[in-house]
């Protein structure tokens, strides 16, 4: 650590700003990893057939740890919507209830209707990406343009 006694105010401000920048990067990395863990936990819960349980049926084993010190959010940042389940889990629920299949617009309406919260400027695109990247779960009938579960 640098000796702060001989530093000017400008040098101290530069040091503080560099530490804030490092912290911002670490917070961002932690949040990214937490989102990845949440997605994996949702897939585990879907595979187990129950929500809210971790490995071997133990509830909350992989729940996101609470950080030791709360951090101040940047003033210009938009907070991410927190949902009980992943978008993929909501889509699975909606398509399970509609075996005939649904169009992208119908899935969008149904997912929002059952309580999925989003701040996305283009939620339809986000939903499409979810369907596209999970081709093993969701199949598009090219004739009816309806998505269905399974292959």
Image (cartoon, rainbow, N blue to C red):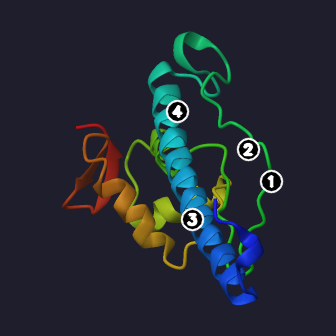
Q: What distance separates the C-alpha of mark 3 from that of mark 2?
A: 17 Å
The quarter of the rendered structure image containing the C terminus is top left
Q: Mark 3 or mark 1: name the one nearer the start of the chain.
A: 3
Q: Nearer the viewer, mark 3 or mark 1?
A: 3
Marks 2,4: beta carbons within 8 A: no
Q: Mark 3 or mark 2: name the one nearer the start of the chain.
A: 3
Marks 4,1: beta carbons within 8 A: no
Please name whichever residue, 98 or 62, is drawn nearer the observer in this view of the structure: 62
Residue 51 place in picture, x, y as percent: 61, 28
Farthest left residue? 142
Marks 2,1: beta carbons within 8 A: yes
Q: What distance separates the C-alpha of mark 2 from that of mark 1?
A: 6 Å
What residue is pinned by disc 2? 67
What residue is pinned by disc 3? 22
Q: Mark 2 or mark 4: name the one nearer the start of the chain.
A: 4
Residue 89 against residue 2 in the figure, above or below = above
How crowded pointer 4 is (Cα within 10 Å; few <14, some 14-19, many 20+) is rated as many
Q: Nearer the viewer, mark 3 or mark 2?
A: 3
- Can residue 131 be seen from the camera position used here? yes
Identify the mark at residue 122; answer none if there is no mark: none
What residue is pinned by disc 1? 70
Residue 123 place in picture, x, y as percent: 50, 71
Q: What distance separates the C-alpha of mark 4 from that of mark 1?
A: 24 Å
Marks 3,2: beta carbons within 8 A: no
Relative to 123, 77 lies left or right: right
Q: Determine which quarter of the picture holds residue 136.
A: top left
Please name whichever residue, 5 or 87, is drawn nearer the observer in this view of the structure: 5
Identify the mark at residue 41; answer none if there is no mark: 4
Rendered residue at 80%/49% (across/down): 69
């Amino acid at each position: 650590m640098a000796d702060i006694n001989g530093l000017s105010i400008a040098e101290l401000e530069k040091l503080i700003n560099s530490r804030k920048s490092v912290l911002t990067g670490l917070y961002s990395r932690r949040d990214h990893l937490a989102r990845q863990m949440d997605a994996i936990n949702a897939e585990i819960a879907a595979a187990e057939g129950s929500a809210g349980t971790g490995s071997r049926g133990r509830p909350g084993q992989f729940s996101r740890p609470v950080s030791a010190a709360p951090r101040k959010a940047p003033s210009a940042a938009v907070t991410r919507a927190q949902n009980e389940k992943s978008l993929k889990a909501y889509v699975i629920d909606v398509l399970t209830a509609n075996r005939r299949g649904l169009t992208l617009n119908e899935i969008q309406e149904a997912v929002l209707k059952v309580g999925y919260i989003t701040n996305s400027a283009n939620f339809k695109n986000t939903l499409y990406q979810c369907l596209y990247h999970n081709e093993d779960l969701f199949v598009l009938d090219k004739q009816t343009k309806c998505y269905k579960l399974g292959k």
